[in-house]
């Protein structure tokens, strides 16, 4: 699929980083896939320097890991990794969401309801992951503490690499809908205590579904023979 590189007046390394990050978020690159500097540079028709910069940033974000001399591989979080990340999320997200609720604006309500409606209407793991991602992005963008927001985004992205596995069942998608309904209610009522409790429950429920997916072996990394598909950026060119 052709995904044109952003044409903005910003450093080329940042543009490459955002495009590779989009690939991960949209699951055009999945856990276990390889990223090779020379191949990416050739696909995007850029030099290897901005690609190297972008890959270094993704590695610092914890989204890829070096497997030199062959390049990098998209990480596949273990259940231990997921639990560690959720411990951090449980400590920070209720506080962050409560501050967002305290600062909620009337003009945000209709959009928040629409995003919740999309979560409810999702019928596939892919649709549900996309709807949940949009719902989360909406309130993440309203966290005024930049350091807190950046920390939560980074850890959420790491878990997102295997997020669809927790939404593979109708039960998981229903739980996501019920959780976002409670978050929406807190937002509508400007109730910070309710917001804090609802987000704690939401994070705990999400972890329980990760544990269920792990028990069902859905979180296992795909075998190497399944990671050799065509590079999703193979046809990309700048220009």
Image (tube, rainbow, N blue to C red):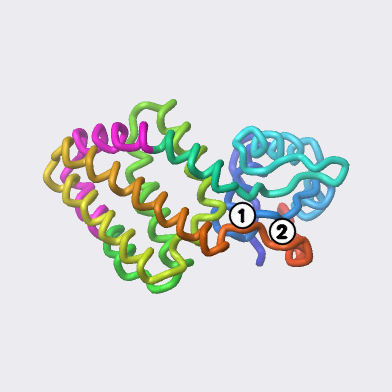
Badge 1, how many Cα within 10 Å: few under 14, some, many 20+?
some
Q: Is residue 119 magenta?
A: no
Q: Quadrant of the C terminus?
A: bottom right
Pointer 2 local density, CA inside 10 Å: few below 14, some 14–19, many at least 20: many
Q: Is residue 100 above or below residue 121?
A: above
> What residue is disc 2 on?
233
Which residue is farthest bottom?
Answer: 123
Q: Is residue 130 above or below residue 93?
A: below
Secondary structure category for the residue under label 1: helix
Residue 218 appearing in the image: yes
Front one among 24 and 208: 208
Q: Quadrant of the N terminus?
A: bottom right
Provide residue 42's location: percent of width, then percent of height: 82, 52
Q: Nearer the viewer, residue 65 or 127?
A: 65
* Residue 199 found in image quarter: top left
On screen, residue 135 above or below 194: below
In the image, what residue occupies the spot 63% across and 50% down?
76
Give residue 23's mark. 1
- Where residue 188 appears, as percent x and y from the top left, is 15, 48
Q: Which residues are magenta?
A: 90-113
* Location of residue 39 in the rendering, given as x and y in whole percent from the top left corner: 82, 52
Q: Magenta region's main secondary structure? A: helix
Q: Which circle's residue, 1 or 2, is located before the other in the chain?
A: 1
Quick check: marks 1 and 2 in contact, CB under 8 Å?
yes
Q: Is residue 19 visible?
A: no
From the top left corner, tell me how far across and down residue 167 is, in percent.
Answer: 44, 63
Q: Give the structural element (helix, strand or loop) at label 2.
A: loop
């Amino acid at each position: 699929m052709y995904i044109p590189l952003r044409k903005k007046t910003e450093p080329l390394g940042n543009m490459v980083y955002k495009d590779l990050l989009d690939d991960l978020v949209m699951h055009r690159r999945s856990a276990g896939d390889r990223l090779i500097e020379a191949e990416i540079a050739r696909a995007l028709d850029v030099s290897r320097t901005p690609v190297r910069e972008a890959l270094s940033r993704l590695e610092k974000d914890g989204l890829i890991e070096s497997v030199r001399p062959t390049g990098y591989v998209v990480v596949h979080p273990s259940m231990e990794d997921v639990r560690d990340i959720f411990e951090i999320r449980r400590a920070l997200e209720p506080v962050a969401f409560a501050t967002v609720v305290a600062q909620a604006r009337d003009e945000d309500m209709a959009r928040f309801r629409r995003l919740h409606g999309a979560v409810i209407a999702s019928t596939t793991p892919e649709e549900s992951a996309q709807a949940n991602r949009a719902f989360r992005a909406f309130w993440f963008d309203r966290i005024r503490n930049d350091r807190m927001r950046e920390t939560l985004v980074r850890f959420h992205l790491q878990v997102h690499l295997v997020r669809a596995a927790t939404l593979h069942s109708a039960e998981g998608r229903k739980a996501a809908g019920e959780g976002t309904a409670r978050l929406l209610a807190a937002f509508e009522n400007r109730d910070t205590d309710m917001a804090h409790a609802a987000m704690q429950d939401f994070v705990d429920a999400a972890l329980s579904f990760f544990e269920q997916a792990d028990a069902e072996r859905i979180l296992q990394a795909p075998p190497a023979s399944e990671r050799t598909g065509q590079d999703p950026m193979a046809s990309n060119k700048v220009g």
